[in-house]
Amino acid sequence: MNTSTQALALIIAVSLVGWVMIRQQRRRPFRPGSAWVMPVIVVLLTVQAVRPEIATLSIMGWSFWGLSVLAGWLIAWIRVQLTTLEHDGRQLYVQGTPWGTLVWAALLIVKVGFRLAAAHATGQLASALTSNGLVMAAASTVSRRVMLAVAYSRGRQHSV
């Protein structure tokens, strides 16, 4: 990749991250029906990517996957705690806080770090870094949607 192509890719990436960070700061409705599209896609892609490793995974590998799921849940919990939730009796609204957006950006950097480490590692280490990163991201995505759906459900019960 030449320098101008790298510069263009960097400009596009920074612009997209900036756009997402601004978008997270806006109040928007949580729609339970469509909220499951991204988690389903992420889980299907993760299962497809890690499927070849399942048969050869050791106890240590399963333990690391378990820790990755736990880390994903913890990340989702932190992000939900740093999200403003408002319920008007009919609709749940979500809005990211500045701290929540910074946590998201930091996690994006960690995710890129996982990918860079996996790209420079060899053999089982590369595979472990990749699969654990994917499992953690999938767990985080699904957990966050579950937590928001529970908040939505609780808001509906309290408003009746």
Image (tube, helix red, strand yellow):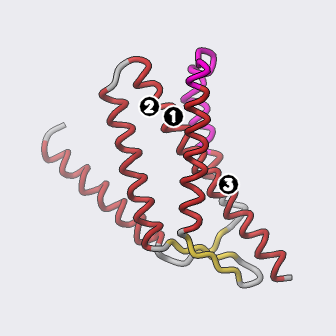
Q: Which residues are magenta?
A: 41-61
**Location of the C terminus (image quadrant):** bottom right
**Location of the N terminus (image quadrant):** top left
Q: Which image quarter: residue 23?
A: bottom left
Amino acid, disc 1: Asn
Residue 80, horizontal then vertical, whole percent: 59, 64
CB contact under 8 Å: marks 2 and 1: yes
Secondary structure character of the magenta stretch overall: helix
Query: Residue visible at 71% across and 78% down?
Result: 91
Amino acid, disc 2: Leu
Real-space Cα distance between discs 2 and 3? Answer: 26 Å
Which mark is first along the chain, 1 or 3? 3
Depth check, mark 2 against mark 3: the one in front is: 2
Which residue position is annotated with label 1?
132
Which residue position is annotated with label 3?
36
As rendered, which of 43 and 71 lies closer to the eye?
A: 71
Query: Residue visible at 66% across and 59% down?
Result: 35
| Element class at badge 3 | loop
Which residue position is annotated with label 2?
129
Depth check, mark 3 against mark 1: the one in front is: 1
Q: Residue furthest right?
A: 160
As rendered, which of 74 and 42 lies closer to the eye?
A: 74
* 3 displayed left or right of 14: left
Real-space Cα distance between discs 3 and 1? Answer: 22 Å
Query: Residue visible at 56% across and 24% down?
Result: 61
Magenta stretch contains residue 58: yes
Residue 67, horizontal then vertical, whole percent: 57, 38
Which mark is first along the chain, 3 or 2? 3
Residue 53, horizontal then vertical, whole percent: 56, 20
Amino acid, disc 3: Trp
Q: Residues within 10 Å of mark 3 (few under 14, many from 20)?
A: some
